[in-house]
Amino acid sequence: MFKFHQYAESADYIKNRLQGFTPAYLLILGSGLGALADQIKNPEYIPYAEIPYFRISTAPGHAGRFVCGNMGGRPVMVMQGRIHLYEGYTAEEVAYPVRVAKLLGVQNLITTNAAGGINLDYQVGDLVVLKDFIKLNFPNSLIGRNIPEFGPRFQDMSHVFDRDYRELLKELAREQGITLREGVYFYTAGPQYETPAEIRAFRILGGDVVGMSTVHECISAVHAGMRILGISLVTNMAAGILDKPLSEEEVLREAEAAKDRFCRLLLAFLQKV
């Protein structure tokens, strides 16, 4: 388990690198979605490997660094690549960057991911603004000794994703002619893709998309009092829906195809929020 002084040391290192720059938004970019960081003006790059106590990204399509600067007129720090449970990390390690960002002054989290489509009305390439999530398995970033500097021992999770942020994103999508769904994210630890039977069960339970990230970060962000916007890109239909195997290459290919739409919508959000 991490102690508060470790989070503080990580934050102090980043603060010294940023030389007075104070981010207001943390953006976490999922598989293949790292191109958004190219929109940052006068970027400062900080590899995770250089930050005390940080873990590194090993997943394909994840550069493993912070990119800090101005985007859409807002001061942001972007995680160009995230950390996953399936890489061998604990839930607390996965959510560690969120708490460090809070100590830097960040009040807002925009988290994105590549996901499989469970809802039969969805299509590959759809963007989905998240309204809730389902996590049934045991790991949890808040398990263990509570750190009161971040939040309470028992955290309410009734409203994880900010309603006003969701409505604004839907309005901007309509203006730009972008199809934007609204749905529930179903979390699995991975790294294996789900079985067709699991996907049928997830659909019955209310899941619209499925993925291997996002949830632990959101739990710690809610605990730390952040406002959250969550967006999934449907890069493949989940197991058993189409008669073909799932692959990492398909995820990255569809993320590349959607990057212009994705970047336009996120930039518009930052400019308008």
Image (cartoon, rainbow, N blue to C red):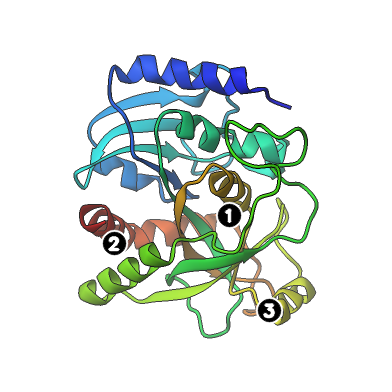
Which residue lies under the disc numbered 3?
203
Gap in angstroms between the C-alphas marked 1 and 3: 22 Å
Badge 3: few (under 14), some or many (20 or more) residues near its Cα, within 10 Å? some
> Reading the chain from its start, which is encountered first: label 3 or label 2?
3
Which residue lies under the disc numbered 1?
248
Please provide percent x and percent y for residue 167: 35, 71
* Residue drawn at 49 percent across, 61 percent down: 161
Please provide percent x and percent y for residue 197: 79, 76
* Residue drawn at 61 percent across, 75 percent down: 118
Which of label 2 and label 1 is nearer to you?
2
Residue type at numbered disc 2: Leu
Using the image, tell me which numbered label, if any, was put on residue 103: none
Q: Are marks 1 and 3 in contact (CB under 8 Å)?
A: no
* Residue drawn at 76 percent across, 77 percent down: 201
Please provide percent x and percent y for residue 141: 69, 42
Q: Is residue 166 above or below residue 45?
A: below
Residue type at numbered disc 3: Arg
Gap in angstroms between the C-alphas marked 2 and 1: 25 Å
Q: Which of 32 and 148 lies nearest the eye of the viewer?
A: 148
Callout 2 secondary element: helix
Callout 1 secondary element: helix
Gap in angstroms between the C-alphas marked 3 and 2: 28 Å
Please provide percent x and percent y for residue 52: 55, 16
Residue 192 occupies quadrant: bottom right
Badge 1: few (under 14), some or many (20 or more) residues near its Cα, within 10 Å? few
Which residue lies under the disc numbered 2?
265
Badge 2: few (under 14), some or many (20 or more) residues near its Cα, within 10 Å? many
